[in-house]
Image (spheres, rainbow, N blue to C red):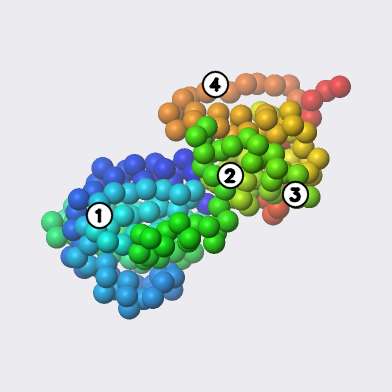
Amino acid sequence: MPELPEVETVRRGLEKLILGKKISSIEIHYPKMIKTDLGEFRKEVPGQVIESIGRRGKYLLFYLSDKVLISHLRMEGKYFYYPDQVPERKHAHILIHFEDGGTLVYEDVRKFGTMELLAPELLESYFISKKLGPEPTKKDFDLLTFEKALKKSKKPIKTHLLDQTLVVGLGNIYVDEVLWRAKVYPAKSSQTITKKEARAIHEQTISVWSKLLIRVALPLEVIPMPLVRMVLCKNYTKFMIRPA
């Protein structure tokens, strides 16, 4: 599954390619990907102009003239833009054609990706229903709220971070990195996390995300410690055991 930085990279790339373009028609080759009314989707999308592209967690938000198209890439979803002719693509499930001749193609080998079309005023309630946590930024990720949420759950801290209710966008790889940097054992119960540990997790979450955003290449730190791997929440978890 694409991690949050990859989804943000897709958003930025699409912004450069399709902003301001008017949709002339749409082809849907795998209707099950459309999770709102299919007939309305087919009727309402043509004629819309792509005004802006946002993101909430791992959801891409295409702000159209009077609708919002919500896209989730799930495991293997990808977008391709073709300025003119579209080649034959086995896994091209949704094609959005623009008036200028270009086409945005959504491909998904496993067909897990989803698209939904909503009125803008329904967007807030949509994400409330998803129980998504805040974005991993200083502005949105409040420490006190985070600490209170931890005390209400017996989930292992890694599992809790992965479920997207504490903070959005952290996948398996980045949760491992955050917890390693914060020096917190991944299987430790959320409600037993100390204030010091909660503050460290909070700080490292923001730090890891901000560094990924600005593409800072951090040197690898070579540490002579054994690497342990276990399965937690159906994901491989890697951590190091520090010598006593």
Question: Going from the N terminus, do you reach mark 3 or mark 4 first?
Answer: 3
Question: Going from the N terminus, do you reach mark 1 or mark 2 first?
Answer: 1
Question: Going from the N terminus, do you reach mark 4 or mark 2 first?
Answer: 2
Q: Is residue 192 above or below residue 132?
A: above
Q: Secondary structure at mark 1?
A: loop
Q: Is residue 48 left or right of residue 57?
A: left
Q: Secondary structure at mark 2?
A: loop
Question: Going from the N terminus, do you reach mark 3 or mark 2 first?
Answer: 3
Q: Which residue is mark 1?
A: 50
Q: Position of residue 176 (x, y in %)?
A: 65, 38
Query: What is the spatial separation of the Cα atoms under label 3 and label 2, in whole angstroms?
Result: 15 Å
Instruction: Give the class, few, some or many, for how many residues have Cα within 10 Å of label 2's Cα (few <14, many ≥20).
Output: many
Q: Is residue 37 left or right of residue 244?
A: left
Q: Nearer the viewer, residue 96 or 91?
A: 96
Q: Secondary structure at mark 3?
A: loop
Q: Which residue is mark 2?
A: 167
Most extreme residue toward the right is 244
Q: Is residue 93 left or right of residue 103?
A: right
Foreground tag (3 vs 4): 3
Q: Which residue is mark 3?
A: 152
Instruction: Give the class, few, some or many, for how many residues have Cα within 10 Å of label 4's Cα (few <14, many ≥20).
Output: few
Q: Position of residue 159 (x, y in %)?
A: 69, 49
Q: Which residue is mark 4?
A: 219
Question: Going from the N terminus, do you reach mark 1 or mark 4 first?
Answer: 1
